[in-house]
Image (cartoon, rainbow, N blue to C red):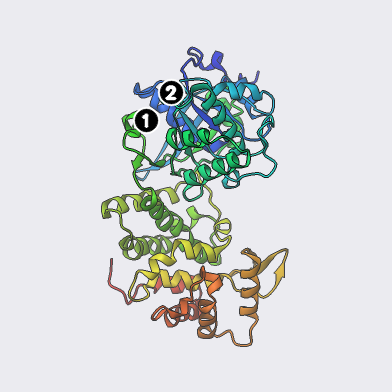
Amino acid sequence: MPPPRLTLAVAGGPPNQRPERFLQFGEGVFLRGFVDWMVHRLNASGHFDGSVLVVPPRPSDKAARLNAQDGLFTFIQRGLVNHEIVEEIEIVRSIRRALDPAKDYAALLACARQPELRYIVSNTTEAGIACHPDDRFDAEPPVSFPGKLTRFLVERHRAFGDTPASEMIILPCELIESNGHALRACVRETAARWQLPPDFLAWLDARILFCNTLVDRIVTGFPADEADALAERLGYTDALLNTGEPFHAWIIEGPAHLADELPFAHAGLNVTFTPDVRPYRERKVRILNGAHTLIALAAFPAGHVTVKQTLDDPRFAAFLRRTLHDEILPTLDLPRADLEAFAAATLERFANPFVHHALLSISLNSTSKFTARLLPSLERHAAPPPGLTFALAALLAFTRGTELRDGALLGHRADGSTYPIRDTPEALAFLQSLWSAADTSPETLTRAALAHAPLWGGRDLSLLPGLVPAVSARLAAIQLRGIIPSLETLFSNSPSH
């Protein structure tokens, strides 16, 4: 007989009767392994009493699937903590119910009249925070997430007027910069297009707080290749089984009183309330995302496939560690101890044996990623530092291709196999012409590439003192001896860290 499906009858305990304080637009694995797990932990700490109402932003069967399991799902955290493999399994009980606005729109509007509802979270993909020309006030429901949210807020205003009871705090989790400001702008644009009255806009400004946030956790989702074994081990099947790494961080830009309202610290959760999220975003982009770009474009042509495999190579591990500590951390503005801790956590996350992050996927749009993630650190140095210079040379070597096929340039690994180089059409056209030129000597090619401002966010990198000769020397070494031998001698003439 197969194991039973996870429901309250299997999990035990009473039904979730906690007041619905969170409205969540999005039912995917990330929000369930991030916000819903945090609310569950917060309730368990005894410092909060609330549940989550989940609303899929697009028509799907996800609401029915959640309700079929009484809002329950299993979350498995596994990875490295202090260099030891850990695993923690728990049934998350924070979701009270889910509703599909495409099937019961009136029920969604009725939620706006619930006085205990206080917070709105969302993760509708980056494209979700965008106005839609087909959104209509009388649609049931409007097409876009901002449209649904605007109509919901109208109902809230009608129910409570301009009173403290109407106030809401909106915490978007979409991975775009200034996500709170972007969502607020969409709501205001939608309200203007719908010709909503001035008192609604005044109420929106006075009573609805849109917070910029930064989220950080790898949620790996349903482990299909382990599902049967896990069902036998758990004693039940869970169609919503979710997995993720132990590391988590939520940075919320807002007033200090939010830390008292949402006392995540009392539950041992890594949530930071700050008046300015930007230094934390810069930390993440420059250290975590920058580290990905730093190693991926060198490691893949050298024969590695995943981030974990790359960090298992002591040469790449030493290169990453030294470049982070000597060349990237000194260019950031947060306290050094904070940066050291984040860098250490990043290295531990990269070594997680349960996360298989493909280098080739990191290589997508590598020129713009280098510009956003590594160039700001490079520009802060008076002279080109060895690690970042090597990364830029490795990027040029990675993009070597003269044949376009299926919208990608074809690159060549050390073993002779090919790989797709994917970037914008404009970048690919330039790189193809660059490598097809009559003179592809390292210095000529480096100067032409670095001087091509559209490749680097409008900047002519050939003007940075000493960068062209430094990069061309690294590129020449890579072409002559290969990635690994060049990496082994990279810091030979530099002081030891």
Q: Which residue is mark 2?
A: 165
The image position of residue 95, as x and y in percent, is 52, 24
Mark 2 touches mark 1? (CB < 8 Å): no
176 or 407: nearer the viewer: 176
Residue 454 appears in which quarter of the rendering? bottom right
Tell me the residue at 35%/69% (across/down).
380
**Earlier along the polypeptide chain: callout 2 or callout 1?**
2
Q: Residues within 10 Å of mark 1 (few under 14, many from 20)?
A: some
Residue 209 appears in which quarter of the rendering? top left
Q: Report if residue 270 is visible in the image.
A: yes
Q: Is residue 182 left or right of residue 99?
A: left
Outermost residue on the right side: it is 406
15 or 303: nearer the viewer: 15
Task: Name the quadrant of the N terminus.
Answer: top right
The image position of residue 256, as x and y in percent, is 31, 37
Residue 464 circle label: none
Residue 262 circle label: 1
Tell me the residue at 51%/14% (across/down).
15
